[in-house]
Amino acid sequence: MIPTEGNSESPPTFWQRLGHWIGPLIAIGAFLAAALLLYRKLGGEAWPKVVAAIEGVPLSAVALAVGLTALNYVILSGYDGLAVWYLKQPLKPLRVMLVAFVGYAMSHNLTWMLGGAASRFRLYLAWGFSAVQVVKIFALIGLTFWTGFCFLAGMVFMLVPMEIPPHTHLPLNSTFWLGPILLGMLGIYLVGCAIGRPIYIYKFPIVFPPLRLAALQAIVASCDLMLQAAIAYTVMPSGYAPGYWRFANAYLLGIAAAILTHVPGGTGVLEFVVLELAPTDGEHVVDDAAIFGSLLVFRGIFFLLPLVIAIVLFLGHEWIAARKRTTAETLKH
């Protein structure tokens, strides 16, 4: 919300100040809890096994995971591409890919607000977008993700449900019933898109995008999430063979938990959820430390490697832009 002119000078209330700390406190608490739970699950002497698991990932699996990660980041540009297309703001494809790559590499590691939003604001404003348009892009990107998540996770949970281990003490014994819930939420959204006009709730209008855009949102985000799970599954230890779709159950739950806890990169949260829930085939027993080591390899490939490249690209863009401004000012004088 934009504050009114009359209260712009008034000091923030206690609840407003508290609100700024709720997100970070939740993230810190979730990270510490995940770290403690991982320590208890793996044991204090698991690190040599983790290192051995990391060293034991075949180079062919690493190369395949890197290739799939490159493909995934191309697909990620569809989030920004759909947003600028809907806003009817022409933007060159290379710029769409740049802002998406930098934005997602940073938000994957530094959270959305600290990384993705800041870098996107910087780039979009430099390219002539208004602040209001950038905020709309943020909203559409988030909407695209949850549209695809509800569709893909809903279908996976229903068609290939995963049993939830009893020791987790969750109120569900299977992911099956999460499927209808997510698909029901998606159905409500699609109905709103099909109506084609704003829906008012307590005099506040809710504007839905056209149904065609909603279908494209589901496709882009579903492909993104399927590839993410495939990258993680590619580097799993040999002998770990629950099947891709059963593994995807755990990965999708881990991604949702990582986003909802606001932990940067879902560090610890994603690993714990996947480690706790990812099923085995019942015939091959794979040590938890080996699975955790493979998840660290996945984090290095999918999270950290793109972050390094994104920082270089962003700094390079800023350097070129500064050179152009200096040259323009010199020509003026």
Image: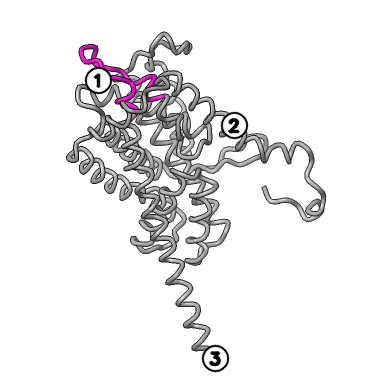
Marks 2 & 3, CB-CB < 8 Å contact: no
Label 3 element class = loop
User: Is the residue marked by circle 3 packed among few (<14), some (14-19), or many (20+) residues within 10 Å?
Assistant: few
Marks 2 & 1, CB-CB < 8 Å contact: no
Q: CA distance from mark 2 to mark 1?
A: 33 Å
Q: Amino acid at mark 3?
A: His
Q: Residue 254: give x, y in percent of width and height.
A: 41, 28
Q: Total label count? A: 3
- Residue 184: which quarter of the image? top left
State the extent of the magenta-drawn residues as a range: 273-292
Q: Amino acid at mark 1?
A: Pro
- Residue 85: which quarter of the image? bottom left
Q: Residue furthest left?
A: 60
Viewport quadrant of the C terminus: bottom right
Marks 3 and 1, the one that precedes in the sequence? 1
Marks 2 and 3, the one that precedes in the sequence? 2
Asked if the magenta segment contains residue 5, the reply would be no
- Which residue is denoted by mark 2 in the rendering? 26
Residue in the image at 49% along x and 61% along y: 124
Label 1 element class = loop
Q: Which mark is residue 242?
A: 1
Q: CA distance from mark 3 to mark 1?
A: 68 Å
Asked whether, in this view, residue 245 is left or right of residue 89, the answer is left
